Image (cartoon, rainbow, N blue to C red):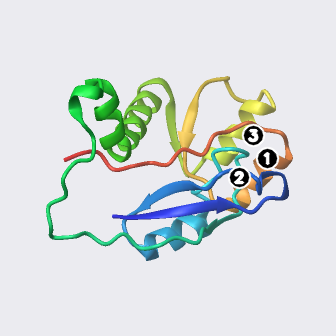
Amino acid sequence: MIKYSLKCVQENCKKNEPFDGWFQNSASFEKQIDAGYVSCPYCGGLNIKKNLMSPAVKSTKKKKSKIISKNVKHNELNQNTNKQIDMMVVLRNLKNEIKKNAEFVGKNFTKEAKAIHEGKSKERAIYGQADAKDLEELKSKNIDFINVPWVQDDN
């Protein structure tokens, strides 16, 4: 997995902090960007670019912890060391909740969202797939949606 620092380049969002995205490889990142699967967590925009970042290099030497455990509560220590893992857990839990409470409509997501918005289809929670062009069309028609990163289940 590769962790990229990402930045939204929408005019109204440029001042917001960068956010992280995890991808299987660089080709997966490019594919998801081109398909419109990566959106800004602040404004929902799809104009996302990689932020300038330095590579993470693992050392083979053991590091001594600078945290003195008697001065830190267990919860605080756990929060500091597991932030990356916790985000994946949160995304997996969100995915499970969506699957449990919404209907999967697959590639018909855009069509079904429009039908629900126009009152031609029963109002309900749905999820599925759409490309960037279709998401822009939904946005232009003021149809609300959320673009959620669909992480793999933990094996």
Residue under the point 29% across and 33% down: 78
- Tag 3 residue: 114
Give how far apart the Cα atoms at labels 3 and 2 are.
11 Å
Q: Residue furthest bottom?
A: 27
Q: Is residue 70 above or below residue 62?
A: above
Element carrying mark 2? helix
User: Which amino acid type is marked by label 2?
Assistant: Leu
Where on the picture, by quarter, is residue 77?
A: top left
Relative to 95, is 136 on the left or the right?
right
User: Which amino acid type is marked by label 1?
Assistant: Lys
Q: Position of residue 94 (x, y in %)?
A: 44, 33
Q: Position of residue 52 (x, y in %)?
A: 58, 72
Which disc number belongs to residue 139?
A: 1
Which disc number belongs to residue 135?
A: 2
Residue under the point 32% across and 44% down: 85
**Does label 3 or label 2 sit earlier along the sequence?**
3
Give the total number of marks visible in the rendering. Answer: 3
Identify which residue, 152 or 6, lies in the foreground.
6
Circles 1 and 2 in contact, beta carbons < 8 Å: yes
Which disc number belongs to residue 121?
A: none
**Does label 3 or label 1 sit earlier along the sequence?**
3
User: Which amino acid type is marked by label 3?
Assistant: Lys
